[in-house]
């Protein structure tokens, strides 16, 4: 009887101590006509549009922010922040127009969606300016 009780107690402790990590928000490119959804090659000073669609997973959506990095830099520079309004906590869409530099090189554009618990989901587009 003691062995059975010890086994049940240990099973309960293991079962309830295992925390599944929550997933970050879902983020996807808008695939409608006119939006870029992948890596591209453009002329210097060109503009293009990116549409983003974000959905809540477990926690409310909080903020979408965009970053860019030039010529293979490891860290991005903040481009813009978009805060989810009260009616956008479960579903958030944003269309962003990006203008490349007026010089040749590589640009990396990173789109980050955060939820109210601080989890981040990312998408990226690499732009070759030539």
Image (tube, helix red, strand yellow):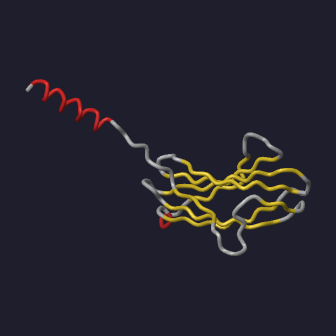
Query: Going by the image, does 41 lie left or right of 109?
Result: right
Vertical relation: 15 (above or below) 35 = above
The percent position of residue 30, horizontal first and vertical second, equals 63, 68
Query: Going by the image, does 85 lie left or right of 79?
Result: left
Q: Quadrant of the C terminus?
A: bottom right
Residue located 77% across and 66% down the image: 48
The percent position of residue 62, horizontal first and vertical second, equals 52, 55
Farthest residue, direction left:
1
Q: Quadrant of the N terminus?
A: top left
Q: Nearer the viewer, residue 111 or 83?
A: 111
Vertical relation: 111 (above or below) 9 = below
The percent position of residue 43, horizontal first and vertical second, equals 89, 62
Vertical relation: 2 (above or below) 12 = above
Q: Nearer the viewer, residue 15 or 64?
A: 15
Residue located 17% across and 26% down the image: 6
Residue located 71% across and 60% down the image: 38
How many marks the image carries: the answer is: 0
> Residue 54: which quarter of the image?
bottom right
Query: Going by the image, does 50 lie left or right of 26?
Result: right
């Amino acid at each position: 009887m003691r062995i059975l009780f010890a086994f049940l107690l240990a099973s309960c402790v293991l079962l309830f101590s295992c925390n599944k990590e929550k997933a970050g928000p879902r983020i996807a490119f808008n695939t409608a006509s006119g939006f870029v959804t992948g890596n591209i090659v453009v002329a210097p000073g060109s503009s293009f549009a990116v549409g983003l669609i974000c959905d809540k997973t477990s926690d409310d959506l909080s903020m979408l922010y965009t970053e860019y990095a030039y010529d293979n830099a490891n860290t991005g520079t903040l481009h813009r922040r978009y805060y989810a309004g009260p009616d956008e906590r479960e579903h958030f869409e944003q269309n962003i127009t990006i203008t490349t530099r007026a010089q040749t090189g590589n640009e990396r554009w990173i789109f980050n969606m955060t939820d109210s618990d601080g989890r981040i989901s990312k998408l990226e587009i690499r732009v070759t300016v030539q």
